[in-house]
C-alpha cells in the first residue's frame, strides 16, 4: 500500500465523460489498496470564461473578488469527481482549498501557501475515503478565498504531497511527459524518462508549458519526486527528481521555444550608476516580467539596455518606461515584436564546454541570425527571428544528438 | 439612513448585462445614504445545468456533494455583482454563505438556518461597504457547505434581515408583485399593494410561484416586513406584513392555480384505526409531498382515501403504497393525472360566510365540475379538470369582484 497524490489538469476533467474516465483511473489505483488524494483543476476553458465575465462587469476587477469567482471552477470539478467515484462505488469526499486546510498569505490571485493542516485529509484517508481537493486555491487568515496563480493546481498537488508525506505524486496532463523538444515542431523529439528539477525548471521557464515553474521549485525545495504523465493513455511518463549521477553523461536534455516574447530596446540613456536600476525598478513596479537582459555601454557615456518581456506586458512596459526616461535625462524605447526565444537545457552543460559553440555553429550553418544571448548554469538561450525559430529548434535538436539519443 | 436588505433572483442576475443593471440599482439605493446588504441567486438556469452535470456523472449524486457543487452558482453571481459595483465606484465585498456566518444544521440540500453571526457583515457596513451575500447556502458545524432548498435565496434575505435588524427587505424578482390571479390567465388580475403573511403563504402553497413558503413562514415568525417587486422596472411592489385591521374589509384577496398536481385514490382499504396513518407515514417516509386529503368511509367497513401529490412524486407515491396495501389487507390505487387545483385566499374569509357558496355557485354556472374540496381558515381549494382550471380561475376572479376591486 502506498499513499499517492494524483493531479488531473483542465483537459483531463474537461467534461463529464472525461471526469468519469478520471474516476475509473482513480478507482483502479484505489483498488490496488493505495491511499489516494486527487487534486483537480477547473474544466478546460472555465477559468477563461469566468475572467471574461468578470471583465464584462468591471474593467479592472478586484483581485479579492476574482479569487472568490475563479475558485468555483475547481469546486465544480472536485464535487463532480467525488460524485463520479460514488457512481463507481468508491468512498470519496470533495474539499475546497479552505476545507482541505490550505492556508495562504493574503496576496490575492498569486497567494503563497503558508501551511497545510493535513488532519482532515488524514482522517478521511484512515476511513478509507478518496479525498478530492480543488486545486489552485486556498484560504487566508481572514477567511477570504485566495488563488495561487494560473497553473497552480500542480502546486496544490506538490504541496499536499509534501504535507501528507505521499509516496508518489502523479501529475496527469494531456501530454505523455516531458520531451526533448515540442513534438509538433521537432518530429524526432523523444520523451525523457527522467529529468532533474533544475532541468525541468529551465525547460518550464523556456516555454515548455508542461508545468508551472513554481510547482517545480516547491517540489525541489521539499524533495517531492513527481511524475508527469498523460490521463489519456497508460504510457509511463517523465519522472522529475534530484539530479543523479548518471545524468552527467548527457549534455543537453532538451530544446525549448518561447514565441510569447517581444524585445524591448532602451537606447541612448545616460550611463551613470542607477540608470539601469531605475529602469528595472519601474518595470517591476508595473509587474512586467522581464526575462533576458543585455546591456551594452555605447560611446559618449550613453548606454543601451535590451531585454525581453511577455507579449501581453508590452504596453505596460512601454508606459512604465516613459517617466523613467524623463527622470534619467532622455533616451528612446523601441519594441521588436517578431522575435522568439530558443533555449537548450541540460545539467551536463555545467561541466562541458562547447555547448554554446555547437549551438551557434548549427544556427549559423542554417543561416539563422542570433539577436541576443543569455546563459545560465544549465541553459543557453538565444533570441532569433520568430519566423525561423521552429527551424532553429530542429537544427539544434539534431546538433545535440537528441534525435537519436 | 435606513438599513436595507435586497434580494435579486435568478432572472434579475441572468447575465452580465443584468448584473450591471442590478449594480446600478444598488448604487442608487446606496447613494441615498442607506446601508445595504444584497443577496443574489445563481444566474437563471445555472442550478439546473449543474444538476444535469451531476446526474451525468452519477445516477444518484450524494447530497453533500450536490451542495458543494450547487453553491458555486451563487458564489459566481455574488463575486460578479461586487465587481460590477466596484466598476461604478461603490465599495463592496462578496461573501459566500459560510463567510456571511450563516450556520445551518447538517441536513444537506434542505438545511435549516440555525444562527447567523452578523459581526462580519456589521463590520463591513460600518466601513461603508455594500455586502453581497450568496443566497441559498450556508455552512454546518463540520465545515461542509449546505444549501437551503430550491428558491431559498429568499430565505437567506429574510433571515439576514432579521439578524441585521434591517429596516426594509426587498425581494426583487421578474414580476411586479403579487397579483389577485396569474395575469397570463386572468387578464383583469390586479397587483395587490399589501398582503398578510398568511395570505401570502396560502397563495404560495396554492401555486403562485412568486416566493417560497418557508421564506414567508420565517418572515412571519420573526416579523420581517418585506416587499416583492420587479428588478426590471421601478413600479412599487406588494408589501407583505402582519394582518392589519383594514384588511378585514376585503373577503377574498386572490385566486391561485396549481396545475402541477395529480389525484391519487386509495380505495377499498379496511377501515380500522391506523390504516390512514400507515398510508401517510409511508408517503412521508418516501418524501412525497401530500397536499389535499379527503377520506370517505364507504359501506362494509372499507374506506377510500383521496389526496393530491406533485406530479413529480407520482411514481414514488405509488411505489410507497404497495407494501402498505399488503400490510393493511388489500385495496387499490388509482391515479388521475388530468386535474388541477384552484384556490381562493383571503384573511377576511374567516369572519364571512358565503365564500364557499359563491365559489361553488360560480363554477356550477360555468358547468365546471368539482372533484375535491378542502378548506383552511383563509383558503378554499377545489380540484377541477385541468383543461378547465384557467376558465375556473377567471370565473372565480370575477365572482369575488377582484376584477374591479
Image (cartoon, coloured by chain):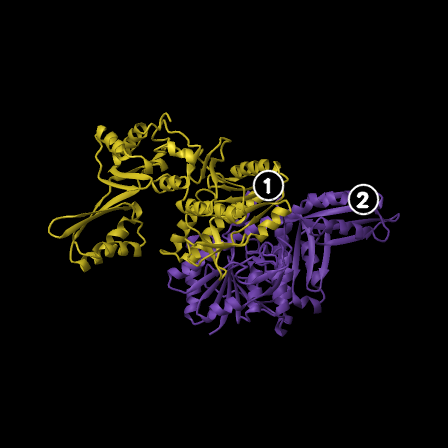
Chain colours: A purple, B yellow
Q: Is residue B383 left or right of residue A145?
A: left
Q: Residue furthest left?
A: B300
Q: Which residue is mark 2?
A: A325
Q: Name the chain letter of the residue that bears numbered label 1.
A: B
Of residues A347 and B58, the one drawn nearer to the viewer in this rendering: B58
Q: Secondary structure at mark 2?
A: helix
Q: Residue A302: x and y, percent?
A: 85, 48
Q: Quadrant of the N terminus of chain B?
A: top right
Can residue B44 be seen here? Answer: yes
Give the class, few, some or many, for how many residues have Cα within 10 Å of label 1's Cα (few <14, many ≥20): many
Of residues B309 and A152, the one drawn nearer to the viewer in this rendering: B309
Task: Classify residue A84 by image quadrant.
Answer: bottom left
Q: Residue A356: x and y, percent?
A: 71, 61
Does residue A359 sit above or below A55 in this rendering? below
Q: Quadrant of the C terminus of chain B?
A: top left
Q: Are marks 1 and 2 on the same chain?
A: no
* Residue B85, label in figure: 1
Total numbered badges shown on the rendered structure? 2
Of residues B209 and A113, the one drawn nearer to the viewer in this rendering: B209
Q: Residue sitting at 55 percent across and 65 percent down?
A: A160
Q: Residue A129: x and y, percent?
A: 44, 67
Q: Secondary structure at mark 1?
A: helix
Q: Residue furthest top?
A: B404
Q: Is residue A29 left or right of residue B268?
A: right
Can residue A398 be seen here? Answer: no
Q: Residue A296: x and y, percent?
A: 81, 52
Does residue A67 sit above or below A112 in this rendering? above
Does residue B349 sit above or below A370 in this rendering? above
Q: Name the chain letter of the residue that bears numbered label 2.
A: A
Q: CA distance from mark 1 to mark 2?
A: 37 Å
Q: Is residue B169 left or right of residue B390?
A: right
Q: Residue sitting at 82 percent across and 50 percent down?
A: A275
Amino acid at each position: 500500500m502506498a499513499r499517492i497524490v494524483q493531479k488531473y489538469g483542465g483537459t483531463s476533467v474537461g467534461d463529464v465523460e472525461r471526469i468519469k474516465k478520471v474516476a475509473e483511473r482513480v478507482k483502479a489505483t484505489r483498488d490496488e489498496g493505495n491511499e489516494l488524494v486527487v487534486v483537480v483543476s477547473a474544466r478546460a476553458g472555465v477559468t477563461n470564461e469566468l475572467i471574461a465575465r468578470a471583465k464584462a462587469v468591471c474593467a479592472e476587477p478586484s483581485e479579492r473578488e476574482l479569487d472568490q469567482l475563479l475558485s468555483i471552477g475547481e469546486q465544480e470539478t472536485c464535487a463532480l469527481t467525488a460524485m463520479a467515484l460514488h457512481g463507481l462505488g468508491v468512498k470519496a469526499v470533495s474539499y475546497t482549498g479552505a476545507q482541505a486546510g490550505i492556508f495562504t498569505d493574503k496576496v490575492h490571485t498569486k497567494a503563497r501557501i503558508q501551511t497545510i493542516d493535513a488532519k482532515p485529509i488524514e482522517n478521511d484517508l484512515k476511513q478509507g475515503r478518496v479525498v478530492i481537493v480543488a486545486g489552485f486555491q486556498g484560504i487566508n487568515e481572514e477567511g477570504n478565498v485566495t488563488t495561487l496563480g494560473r497553473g497552480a493546481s500542480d502546486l496544490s498537488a506538490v504541496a499536499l504531497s509534501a504535507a501528507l508525506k505521499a509516496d508518489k505524486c502523479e501529475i496527469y496532463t494531456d501530454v505523455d511527459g516531458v520531451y526533448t523538444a515540442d513534438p509538433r515542431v521537432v518530429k524526432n523529439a523523444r520523451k525523457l524518462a527522467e529529468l532533474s528539477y533544475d532541468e525541468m525548471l529551465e525547460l518550464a521557464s523556456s516555454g515548455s508549458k508542461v508545468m508551472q515553474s513554481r510547482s517545480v521549485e516547491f517540489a525541489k525545495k521539499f524533495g517531492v519526486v513527481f511524475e508527469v504523465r498523460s490521463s489519456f493513455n497508460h504510457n509511463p511518463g517523465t519522472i522529475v527528481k534530484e539530479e543523479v549521477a548518471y545524468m552527467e553523461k548527457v549534455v543537453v536534455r532538451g530544446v525549448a521555444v518561447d514565441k510569447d516574447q517581444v524585445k524591448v530596446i532602451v537606447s541612448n540613456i545616460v550611463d551613470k550608476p542607477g540608470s539601469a536600476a531605475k529602469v528595472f525598478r519601474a518595470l517591476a513596479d508595473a509587474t512586467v516580467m522581464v526575462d533576458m537582459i543585455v546591456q551594452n555601454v555605447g560611446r559618449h557615456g550613453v548606454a543601451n539596455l535590451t531585454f525581453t518581456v511577455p507579449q501581453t506586458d508590452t504596453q505596460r512596459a512601454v508606459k512604465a518606461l516613459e517617466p523613467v526616461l524623463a527622470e534619467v535625462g532622455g533616451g528612446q524605447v523601441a519594441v521588436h515584436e517578431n522575435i522568439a526565444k530558443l533555449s537548450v537545457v541540460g545539467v551536463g552543460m555545467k561541466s562541458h564546454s562547447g555547448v554554446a559553440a555547437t549551438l551557434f555553429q548549427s544556427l549559423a550553418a542554417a543561416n539563422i541570425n542570433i539577436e541576443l544571448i543569455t546563459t545560465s548554469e544549465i541553459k543557453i538561450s538565444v533570441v532569433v527571428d520568430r519566423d525561423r525559430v521552429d527551424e532553429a529548434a530542429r537544427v539544434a535538436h539534431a546538433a545535440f544528438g537528441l534525435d537519436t539519443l
